[in-house]
Image (tube, rainbow, N blue to C red):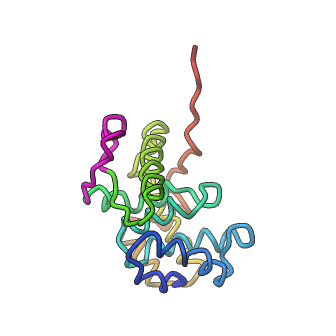
Amino acid sequence: MQWYLPLEHCRSLDEIRQRLQPLLEANDSLPDQQPQRHHDALLAFIGMSSLSPHLKLAAILACVSSTDFDPRLALGALDDAVRAGRALWPGSVAGAVAHHGPAMQVASEEDWLGAFVVGRLAGLRDAMALDGGGANLWHAAFWNRFFAMASRRGSAAGMRLALEQGADPRAGHDPQRPAGPARLTLVK
């Protein structure tokens, strides 16, 4: 469960991007080979890594495909801490997305990467608002899945952490299973 420990000293998204894939591979946790291990590895990273919430969320948004792991789980677990950072949206998009809360701090030497992560965050928050799931539902979903993962892996510390965050051990995975990706319907 602690495959992510070599990432703990990373201070930028660039450093994480260089190391994440090789670490997942070394842990036999690539999504196309071991989907459950991949999912569990990402849950452990989000819930237990001591990296800042900004870096953890940026790593998920920049490096993980939404077909392999639902980024709404990461946002549900980390959004309160990200919002507390009160980062400003770039002026060019602030008017369109500021109503979804503050942006996030992304430490990267690549301007395009920072813009990609911030754009993906805006799209994710927008989709969550449209599907009615909201951050609270996804917060509960994350910690319930984290509890289930910690139970499967025999981690008493992980189960304790999940319970402290409000996990419901009777829920299986989710108290109310969140809907799939938001769907837009064009109306003439």
Q: Is residue 30 magenta?
A: no
Q: Is residue 47 above or below residue 171?
A: below
Image quarter in which the N terminus is found: bottom right
> 136 or 100: nearer the eye?
100
Q: Quadrant of residue 184?
A: top right
Which residue shows up at 50% across the image and 70% down it?
146
Which residue shows up at 60% across the image and 68% down it?
39
State the residue lying farthest toward the top: 188
Q: Is residue 112 above or below residue 123?
A: below
Q: Is residue 108 above or below residue 70?
A: below
How many labels were placed on the picture? 0
Image quarter in which the C terminus is found: top right
Residue 96, x across and y down, in percent: 36, 35
Residue 151, x across and y down, in percent: 55, 77
Asked whether, in this view, residue 58 is left or right of residue 85, the answer is: right
Residue 135, x across and y down, in percent: 39, 51
Q: Is residue 152 above or below residue 109?
A: below
Q: Quadrant of residue 21?
A: bottom right
Asked whether, in this view, residue 12 is left or right of residue 60, the answer is: left
Residue 155, x across and y down, in percent: 51, 84
Q: Is residue 88 magenta?
A: yes
- Which span is picked out in magenta? 85-102
> 79 or 176: nearer the eye?
79
Which residue shows up at 35% across the image and 39% down it?
92
Asked whether, in this view, residue 105 is left or right of residue 18, the answer is: left
Asked whether, in this view, residue 91 is left or right of residue 183, the answer is: left
State the residue lying farthest toward the right: 33
